[in-house]
Image (spheres, rainbow, N blue to C red):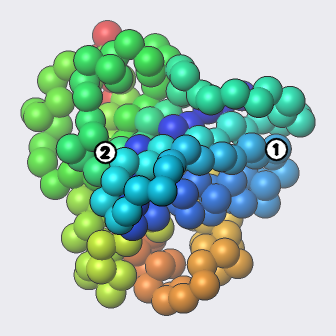
Amino acid sequence: MIEIKFCGRGGQGAVIASQILAKVFFLMGKYPQCFSVFGGERRGAPVASFLRVDNKKIYLKCEIRRPDHLIYMAPDLVDEQEIESILKPDGLILINNALTSGEYVRLRKFRLALIDALSVSEEAGLGSTINTAILGAYAKASGEISLDYLEQAIRETVPAKIEANVTAALHAFDVTHVMEGVN
């Protein structure tokens, strides 16, 4: 089973990103389970969304406390000390940040991927909605999903600017920088 946690802010598309990714895994013949945690906050408030994926039906019904993969759509939500305590040992961290990996010295023991998803999304005409760019980066960083299934899921799920969303995902795949963990 793979457990994934998305951390973002309202308006960035964390919830929709987890739903699109769930659809990708479903198209691949897997069993996804997707759920989100947020209140009545406004745009910009912290949002968490969770996704479990397995080759068999998932009966577990609880929050993901020790994810395999952490996806930070808002770099200001990154807490290196918390990550060290919750991420599984061979975990993946994907961060939307234009900074270099030197900013995340404590996280080098994990697989770390960086993408300037905001620039990619703006270039594609999507503004600050970065969900499909993050998913393109996830496809590269994780190796768990194919771009073909991601494109299909975007086309079947995203209600507007479909071509721009596909473009953002494909471009993000190309420009994501992945560093393998150093133990």
Answer with left or right where residue 53 lies relative to residue 126: right
Q: Is residue 122 above or below residue 79?
A: below
Single out the residue that lies furthest toward the front: 40
Q: Residues within 10 Å of mark 2 (few under 14, many from 20)?
A: many
Q: In x, y percent, where is residue 107? A: 26, 23
Label disc, if present, on residue 172 of the rendered structure: none
| Residue 30 vs residue 59, the one in the foreground | 59
Q: Quadrant of the N terminus?
A: top right
Residue at the location (78% across, 60% down)?
Answer: 27
Residue contact at pointers 2 and 1, CB within 8 angstroms: no
Q: Residue at x 69, y 54 (%)?
A: 22
**Disc 2 residue type?**
Ile
As drawn, the label of residue 95 is 2
Q: How many marks?
A: 2
Say what amino acid the circle numbered 1 marks: Tyr
Q: Looking at the image, which residue is at 66% across and 46% down?
A: 35
Residue positioned most to the right? 57
Instruction: Say whether residue 145 is left or right of residue 174.
Output: right
Quarter of the image holding residue 15? Answer: bottom right
Horizontal side of 109 relative to 154 (left or right) equals left
* Residue position marked by numbered label 1 in the rendering: 31
87 above or below 166?
Answer: above
- Residue 130, image x and y in percent? 37, 66
Residue 128: name its quadrant.
bottom left
Q: Earlier in the sequence, mark 2 or mark 1?
A: 1
Res 137 seen here = no
Q: Position of residue 135 (x, y in %)?
A: 49, 58
Q: In what element is the residue under mark 1?
A: strand
Instruction: Tell me the crowding category of disc 1: few under 14, some 14 to 19, or many 20 or more residues within 10 angstroms, Cα based.
Output: some
Residue 72 visible in the displayed image = yes
User: How far from the left and from the top, in percent, is residue 46?
Assistant: 37, 48
